[in-house]
Amino acid sequence: MSLESILNNEFVYTLLDTLRDVLPIILVIFGFQYFVLRQRIKNIKKILIGLVYVIFGLAFFLVGLEKALFPLGEIMAQQLTNPEFIYGSAQQVMEFIRWQDYYWVYIFAMAIGFATTIAEPALIAVSIKANSVSGGAISVWGLRGAVALGVGIGITLGSFRIVTGTPLHYYIIAGYIFVIIQTFFAPRTIVALAYDSGGVTTSTVTVPLVTALGIGLATTIPGRSPLIDGFGLIAFASLFPMITVMGYAQISHWRANRQTQSNLENTSGE
Amino acid sequence: MLPIILVIGFFQLLILKQPIPNFMEILGGLLMVILGLALFIKGLEIALFPIGESMAYAFARKGSLFWLLIFAFLLGFGTTIAEPALIAVANKAATLAAQAGAITDSEVSRNDYAYWLRITVALSVGSAILIGVLRILRGWPIQWLIIGGYLIIVTLTSFAPEEIIGIAYDSGGVTTSTITVPLVTALGVGLASSIKGRNPMIDGFGLIALASLTPIMFVMVYGMILS
């Protein structure tokens, strides 16, 4: 079989998968539109074309990821967590784990968390919406950057947790407490959006790569069980964006305040 | 896309010191990713956003709370049950549960475990969107719902079997798919802007947050019932 035909088959397969994913949504929407709301959809033609764009766009996106990045990312996660890479030789018996030896894993976790989140389509959607609803006060890139930073920090800390083998819920509960305290100091308009950005970060791009990293770590480190320790990275990735987005809002709020204050001082000084 | 390429290129060539396999195939894949993303964003703006908003306005005009809530539930349930990320995680969880001896290691019991895990998560997302829509209508502050949810999760964590905790926490993140997020966001913002006294920034967002919280609770309860 030529490369061309494999590519085509895979694309058709992914397209059907995407269609299956979209179908229940389309059924619910059109069912309600015609049977409950009993009204015609405005610009039905334009909307159908848009849906075709969405389905084809997602299928292209997924096939491209499958071809280009997932295999490489997964192999890299395995190689970086391989004791041979970390300790230099396979002979060395690992009696105890020094968490410092895994520094490349942490750097990789930070970098891959940040990079995959920047490319996440769901986050792009929410950023566009937040930008238009806030009248431009929240910039698309500012929000995407803040969320990506949060995911990077989250995955790094999550890898550290797997290496040290500390219980997941301590971290999550501490994170929750931090989020709750921060909520009372953050500008009111950002709170709902910040909470949302926890959930949007982890869909198409981030989940497969991050899961591979987690399972890779938990399988190669002695004394870790993939079932108990391998999962949990996604939970970190959905917790920390809340903190960074609220932080982002606090900083821009503070800077805007200082700006108006210095403007006031300037005008009163003249 | 550029950041991902830089990260992978850097680690592959400089740290692991390995050549990049199938370079041409990867290049082709990258082009597809960029094309796909451009198409997706275009479709988002002409289809998903307008449809979510126009339905929100139509429901607000019609004023039928019952149907709006049914719609909210079905939207959450329908989009989650078919979610590929969830299917992948559920299957992985079933394999690991079988290895750990939490369930018998057979094809049937593994499929059963994965299937009911998906149903559980889909139910929880459906209820989350329902509660979230009710919150927008009533104007409840989001932080009280979230803090309440956190308290329930923390309490459940101390009773749930240890092997389910990681999966439960993760299932919160994987539920919200690329198509659900824009639709649900447009619905929330549309509802908040068509109801008097609601601010789209304060009240319109928050549906996704609830949808990532309830699966954690439901899956832990699922684990408690199974053991």
Image (tube, coloured by chain):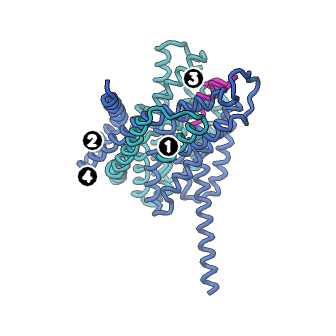
Three-letter code, disc 1: Ile
Q: CA distance from mark 1 to mark 4?
A: 41 Å
Q: Position of residue A97 (x, y in %)?
A: 74, 29
| Residue topped by disc 2 | A35
Q: Residues within 10 Å of mark 1 (few under 14, many from 20)?
A: some
Q: Position of residue B127 (x, y in %)?
A: 47, 38
Quick check: B182 left or right of B5?
left
| Residue topped by disc 1 | B5
Q: Residues within 10 Å of mark 3 (few under 14, many from 20)?
A: few
Q: Which residues are magenta?
A: A216-234
| Residue topped by disc 4 | A42
Q: CA distance from mark 2 to mark 4?
A: 16 Å
| Residue topped by disc 3 | B225
Task: For mark 4, give the secondary structure.
Answer: loop
Three-letter code, disc 3: Ile
**Quadrant hosting residue A168:** top right
Q: Earlier in the sequence, mark 2 or mark 4?
A: 2
Q: CA distance from mark 1 to mark 3?
A: 44 Å
Quick check: B73 left or right of A173?
left
Q: Does A228 appear in magenta?
A: yes
Tell if the residue under mark 3 belongs to the same chain as the one under mark 4: no
Q: Residues within 10 Å of mark 4 (few under 14, many from 20)?
A: few
Task: For mark 1, give the secondary structure.
Answer: helix
Badges 1 and 4: C-beta atoms under 8 Å apart? Answer: no
Chain letter of mark 1 equals B
Three-letter code, disc 4: Lys
Badges 2 and 4: C-beta atoms under 8 Å apart? Answer: no
Q: Which chain is cyan?
A: B
Residue lying at 64% horizontally and 35% vertically, measured from the top left: A159
Q: Which chain is blue?
A: A
